[in-house]
Image (cartoon, helix red, strand yellow):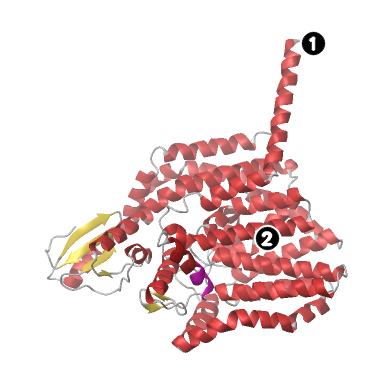
Amino acid sequence: MSSITFSALAGRFSASALLGGLSRCLTSPWAIILAVALAFLLNAHSLPLSDVDEGAFSEATREMLARGNLVSPTLNGEARHDKPILIYWLQAAAVYVLGVDEFSFRLPSILAALAWVVVLYRFVARQEEQSTAVVSVLAMVLSLQVGFVAKAAIADALLNLFICLALFAIYDLFLAGRKGLGTTAIRRQQCLIYLALGLGFLTKGPVAVFLPLVIGSLFFISAGAWREALRTAFFLPGWVIFLSIVLPWHVMVFLDQGDAFFRGFYLQHNLNRYASTFEGHGGNPFYYLLVLPLVLMPFSGWLLAIAGRLLAGLKRADEAALFERFLMCWFAVVLVFFSFSRTQLPHYLLYGCTPLFILLARHRQIDKQRLLAFLPVVLWGLLLAALPWIFERLAGHLTRPLEIILLDGLTAAFARPASWLLALFALLVLAISVWRRLPVWQGLVLIGLLQAGLVFGVIAPCVLSVTQGPVRDAGELARSMGEPVLAYKFNQPSFSVYRQAITPARVPGAGELVITRRDRLDSLAQEVAPLGVTEVYQRGFVSLLRVGESIAHE
């Protein structure tokens, strides 16, 4: 046999060994550990808190501890009725133990996301083989939006956990009745449903009950099990569990505030938020169909590749088809419900994405749809590689001072080596997409790992250094000065977190410190004339000033 033949055999052996080893790695718990480290933990301790949401949740928690009132959250001294109490209690516990820093405020979300991983793995492992459970978890952890929510100091990772717990228990309840497992097994699942609904309600209110209720009811009716649904709806011990979780704090907040929370949260932040546009987050019925590819990136093409298979499966009535019907019903209800909301944010769609991760794992053999599966992520990689060029081209077309300041900062932040890393990511994505012997799902998971490292190791630090770094620095400087500070047309709650003091919003007087945006200096100067202002700190779009010492300002 010639040396060429030996070389060819050696090459095939080594390639086969490499692919086999890669497949074993990507279906082992070690892959989950690596994915979690990159998507949930990387830089969670060092990234500045983002505004408005992270800053608002964190400052409300800090004020609860500072005031010694663990019943009624406030934000800069004003009552905050945006959410119920559970996320604030969990953040307060972390801050009490670890101190006031970014990781403490984010720890409850990280732990909730880890619990979300565990319950997803265990649920899928009960229905499918272990490898499917691992792949579904990898798809979840490495999806772009999940990584952001998992390390954000907001309530959504916790809410996703409880929605999943409730709906997994609902499906297990359906199976228990279908298989005749007995009263004990059925009641166990019913109690778990009400426990999850109660904790979800205490996290974000009625949506945590509404979605599982509608999804579960539609599925049970479609499967001819409406009697079991009715029995669960009137399960008295479940209602005792639910009310024992929800009622005590509602009584306490009523005794502390009267009906202010009920009017502010249930009317303003639930009914009115659904019927009206809040905080400029309006949308249209197609909004979530448009953002879904970005939410699931890099797995958007994977979903497109299996869409026809999923729709065809709706015609079947076997047990596997019923399972997929449940999963698709879950996603469809969330998609339709939030598509008609007048206030829309990308992370709302995550409440319905967990079933998609399971469906992706179940239908991971998509090698015949290679082009469709990789096309969205290839375009995504090219877009990221072009970011520095896009920033440079935008520079001559912006007219608003704030946009110019931020774009200048982003252009500088994404200079080398960040621009090289973005280009390298695009090249690696292209290389993986054309590696034809590599199964498509494995290639997409590899890209997911690379994406997590790039987004949370490079892109997020660059962006937040420009959009939030100046706020953090100004807050820490103001704290070291030990003086009261006022906010002038400046809605960045994280400033109060870093300053560790309330920052009232009003026009300042002589001798007072004030925080504002650089593009609002002229307006501030007119408000305090003829006193004038002098600059104490300036970076990016943030200016910390003292009123009344001179009339010179930038």
Question: Which quadrant does the N terminus fall into?
Answer: top right
- Badge number at residue 283: none
- Whether 359 is among the magenta residues is no
Answer with left or right where residue 509 lies relative to residue 50. Answer: left
Could you say which quadrant of the image residue 217 lies in?
A: bottom right
Q: Amino acid at mark 2?
A: Val
- Whether 89 is among the magenta residues is yes
- Badge number at residue 1: 1
In the rendered structure, which segment of residues is drawn in magenta? 85-90
Q: In the rendered image, is residue 376 in sight?
A: yes
- Dominant secondary-structure state across the stretch colored magenta: helix
Q: Position of residue 474 (x, y in %)?
A: 29, 59
Q: Would you say the residues marked 1 and 2 are in contact, meaning their CB atoms lie under 8 Å apart?
A: no
- Badge number at residue 119: 2
- Going from N to C along the chain, the mark reached first, 1 or 2, is 1
- The answer to which of 377 and 393 lies nearer the viewer is 377
Say which element carries label 2. helix
* 348 versus 396 height, above or below: below
